[in-house]
Image: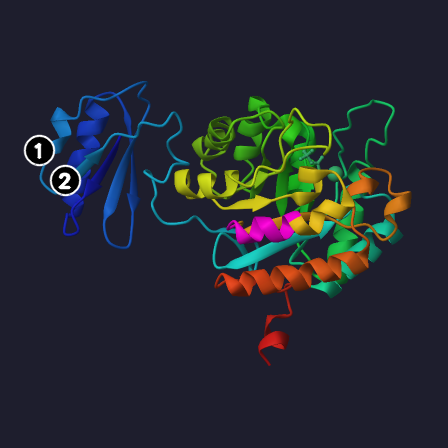
Amino acid sequence: MLVVMQHKATQDEIDVVCEAIAKMGYTPLPMPGEQRTAIGLIGNDGRVDDSQIVGLAGVAQVIHVSKPYKQVSREWRSGNTLVTIAPGVTVGGNEIVVIAGPCSVENEEQIVTAARAVRAAGATALRGGAFKPRSSPYSFQGLGRKGLELLAVARRETGLPIVTEAMDEAGAEQVAEIADCIQIGARNMQNYSLLKSVGRLNKPVLLKRGMAATITELLLCAEYLLAEGNNQVILCERGVRSFDPAARNMFDLNAIPIVHRLSHLPVIGDPSHGTGSRDQVTPMARAAVAAGADGLLVEVHPAPDRALSDGAQSLHPEQFIRLMQEVRAISQAIGRSVSPSPGTAALQIG
Ligand code: PEP
Ligand code: MN
């Protein structure tokens, strides 16, 4: 339940509503807004009897949040949430944020070369996995801590903030020490203990949709993060399993406008995992931006044929340059723009 206060409601009136909610056995969560304060009610399981609340002074409206998730829903917060992953790099506003880089961090030369290439093409942030969730235990598992240190080197060289995956609680603490944004991968979307511990780390989180997860399940998993007090959450559509083996996954473009309707959290598209094949990445990147994605996650490798993971879907740097050009054109056509690489804004304006 959400209690929307009148524009002119006083602090005393807000306090009385909070006390009434507490007396009913629930936890009030006041959310001051520019126009008015809304007070959320936490701790209920099912519809709450609002008769104690509706008549109180200063109450404009009581909204029953019918969705199983609350804090991620638009009913809870109507304006878009902005997620700032580094100074000047904000997801969820008018600017489209492009996070690019290899699937895995392989060695210093590879990650620094990749970082320079994506930055030169205009990427806003660098991705690269140090802890890799691989389908086979015999596949490359990532460099772990060493990979995080190499990401820090690449950040120092290029100024690009880092997005990288955490697979477990111990790894999440290590990732939080170095990275700017913690990725929770598709396979771990419903790892509730990981979600709870990452929610407490006070770092922006990129939460990827599970490969067979509904949009409701994705939003419920995001709710775990918000319930821990972290609303700096970016959702990511990365394709779902389908009946058709023609593509690795089916990139669910519908998810983008649906998530925007249901939630105030930003949503980005990952056409690399969404398709699994290099030739489909740029078309689906264009489509995701056209569909309203707040950003893209794109795998780019200096030499995809030698990549230790996901080479088949990784773009060559020249292909990424072209992708950026096309994405810029589409952004403009829909009244948006691509967020520049950090440190280049002044350069572009001047
Ligand atoms: C990745 O981003 O490299 C990755 C493993 O993605 P997903 O969790 O979507 O499969
Ligand atoms: Mn990958």
Q: Using the rendered image of the protein, determine whether residue 156 is visible from the camera's viewpoint.
A: no
Mark 1 belongs to which amino acid? Gly
| Quadrant housing residue 194 | top right
**294 relative to 177 in the view: left or right:** left
Q: Position of residue 312 (x, y in %)?
A: 82, 41
Can you identify the residue that label 1 sits on?
Answer: 55
In the rendered view, tell whether residue 130 sits above or below residue 240: below
User: Residue 237 placed where, x, y %?
Assistant: 58, 39
Q: What range of the chain is rendered magenta?
A: 284-292
Q: Amino acid at mark 2?
A: Val
Q: Secondary structure at mark 2?
A: strand
Q: Report how far apart the C-alphas of labels 2 and 1 lie in the structure.
A: 7 Å
Residue that mark 2 sits on: 59
- x and y percentages locating residue 116 in the rendered image: 78, 61
Vertical placement of residue 108 versus 275, above or below: below
Task: Please name the residue shown 30% across and 30% down the image.
Answer: 65
Contact between marks 2 and 1 (CB within 8 A): the answer is yes
On the rendered structure, is 218 left or right of 320?
left
> Residue at the spot x=46%, y=43% of the render?
257
Q: Secondary structure at mark 1?
A: loop
